[in-house]
Structure formats: structure tokens, C-alpha cells
Image (cartoon, helix red, strand yellow):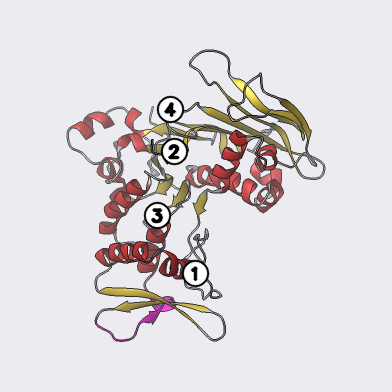
Amino acid sequence: MTEDKSPPRIEQLRVENYRALKQAALREITPLTVLLGPNGSGKSTLFDAFSFLSECFQQGLRAAWDRRGRARELRTRGSTGPIVFELKYRERPRQPLITYHLAIDEGERGPNVVEEWLQWRRGSRGRPFRFLDFQNGQGQAFSGEMPDAQDRRIPISLRSPEVLAVNTLGQFADHPRVAALREFITDWHVSYLSIDDIRSQPEAGPQEKLSRTGDNLANVIQYLNEQHPQRLEEIFAQLRRRVPRLERVDTEPMPDGRLLLLLKDAPFEQPVLSRFASDGTLKMLAYLVLLNDPQPPRFIGIEEPENFLHPRLLPGLCEEFRAASERAQLLITTHSPDFLNGVRQDEVRVLYRNDEGYTHATRCSEIQGIPQFMDAGASLGHLWLEGYFGMGDPLVNAGAPEG
């Protein structure tokens, strides 16, 4: 029997009291999910909710909390309760649905994890079983590969209420389900690609994973050239199909220890430094490197991939995202009707702010009339641009639904 290498899949996300997300939820999340809406609708905030969780596991709760201005800037205006994140996910298809609940509030010395638990229901019947349960640094966890009430219960005191129990216990073999969640979230890549950072000249040395800003793109290309040359050539072939006359991309270590990224056009003998290459070429290269990672992140978030790219490249890029979604779950935000034309209606969530100023999300396939238009051969981008969604229009009632 071959090993099932399907990535974990998030099926639902619920957020409370996180900036404009007073009570927001994404349900039936697809392998490729696209967030659509006008400026100020909450796309970036919802995107940042994933980034916040990722940073909590990679860098610690305190760093993620302080970087965003603590409770004063994070908590929804007028709210007094904790900030809540709740994920429902499966480690593999047909495996039990697991719920991860994390509630954070601010104490006298910083953020506190006031509640954190993991639960599942292994069969189709019976009550959900909570196999990890903590409040303010005190709690318990059940050991075992498939934990249930008959397994050993371990009372645990964490060193601080600002420590995440999953991040701590996930390092131990006694808690494989907790470890699987820790590994999953720690592996997330929430991208904030910066052209200026990509143009930088990092210190030489191969690096396996692309950073969030892309400042180590040259290092990753150096790594792929040494360890996965065939994969790198496939990336370059994809890039050449999108960038006319691009011949090759090279890296060159300098005597002072810096690593140069060089791009050569076919008509010219000498390559040019990345600092003189086009923004669109560099961004497309970075996306292709990320999507074609030999071991890609299990969750990838990308904001507004259309920036700096020609509109005719976007449907093809969308197909690259769809192909990558077989090995990773992708969350994309966009304003582009050209990108949207390459997406299915069940993959799109339209965000808008209600009269109270809070963000809500609606599945595009549930908007009245959209399925019928699509059955008749319409494209999503054109329907959205012409205002047929009835929401998400920046010129009509701040994007809220009509009526």
C-alpha cells in the first residue's frame, strides 16, 4: 500500500474579536480559496489571522502579539472578550475532523492563553473527545496515537500562561496528534513578497525554503541548482514561457560573501543584476520557486498576486496555483477580474463590512443568480466587475449586500 501523501486540509476557520473580525467564519474551505472584496473589506485582516497563528508557532505568542500593537490594536473596537481562533481540519482525507480552539487575552504582563484545546470525534457517533485542554497554563493531555478517554491522562503545568500548549507538547512523542498540528502550523508560508527585498544581495549559501519577503530568493535558487537541478530547470522553463526572450537565471558568489542573482536575455551576451530586472519577472520567478518547492509548505497564503504582472499572465498563474493546491492548501486575496476568471465559484469568498463595520464572508456560489450565470457560460471576473455579485462593490454601500 502506498503512503497517502495528501496534505492536511483546513475545512473551517472561525475568528472572534480580531480587529474587524468580530464574528467571522470561513466554512467549507477549498484547497484553493480566493478572498475577494473592496479595499477595507477585511481581506488583509483575515489573511493576517493566518499569519498571526503562524507567527505564534514559529516565533512565539508574545512576538506576534507585540508586533501588532497588543490588545489595544488587535481587539475589535468595543469588545471586551478574548480574541478567539478556531480551526477545523483533517490530517488526511477521511480521517477524523479535529478542532483546535485558541483564546487569547491580555494580562498584566502580556498576552495569556486563557483557553486552548483540541478535540475530535473518531466515529460517526458519540460525543467529541477533548484530548488536550488548557486554561491559563494549566491543563491536561491524553497520550497515544489515537487518544481517547481510556488512554493515559497527563496533568501538566506550563512555565507561563503565554506559552501555547500545542507548541510545547507537540515536541514530544507521547502526543503524536498534537505534534502533527504543531508541525502543520509551523510549516505555513504566509507570503509578504517584497520586490525591494528580492533585489537585495544576501550572503552566499544555499537555503532550502523561500522566506516570507523573498529576500533569500538567490539562496534558494543556489540550493535548487545544487540539490534539485531538474526541478530548477522546470521552473526556468515555466518562467521562459511567460517572459519573452529570457534565457536563463544564475547565481554568482562574490569575493565579499554576497550572492548575486543574474538574469540573461537571449539577445545580449551579459546578464543583468536582479536590481535591474523587471518587477514582474522577479515576482513570477519567486512564485514559481515557492509553488515548485520539492517539499512545499502545507499552507501557502499570497496577497494580491496580480501586482506587477501583466493581466494576460494571471489566468496561467491561477492554474499554477491550482496545480500546487494538490500538494498544499492555498489562500489568495485579489482585486483582479483577470485572475478571478481562472477560479471556480465555489473557491471564492466575497468579503464585505456590515452596517456596524464588521467583516462578513459569503461564498460566491451562494450569491443569488451567480450559479445560473456561470451555467450560461459567464466568467466570474466579468460578473464581479459588472456588479452582479450584489456585494463587494466599493462604490455601493461600502461593499455590503443590497437590500
Mark 4 or 3, nearer chain start: 4
Q: Nearer the viewer, mark 1 or mark 4?
A: 4
> At numbered mark 3, what does the secondary structure look like: helix, strand or loop?
helix
Provide the residue span drawn in magenta: 267-277
Q: Residue at x 53, y 72 (%)?
A: 205
Pointer 1 and pointer 3: residues touching (CB < 8 Å)? no
Q: Residue furthest right?
A: 108
Q: Nearer the viewer, mark 4 or mark 3?
A: 4
- Rendered location of residue 38, percent (x, y): 42, 45
What amino acid does circle 3 point to?
A: Leu
Is disc 3 surrounded by few (<14), some (14 to 19) or many (20+) residues within 10 Å?
many
Q: Residue at x 35, y 82 (%)?
A: 271
Mark 4 or 2, nearer chain start: 4
Mark 1 or 3, nearer chain start: 1
Viewer can see residue 394 = yes
Q: Residue furthest left?
A: 376
Q: Nearer the viewer, mark 3 or mark 2?
A: 3
Mark 1 or 4, nearer chain start: 4
Estimate the spatial distance between the alpha carbons at disc 4 and disc 3, rounded to whole Å: 26 Å
- On the image, numbered disc 2 is attached to which residue? 351
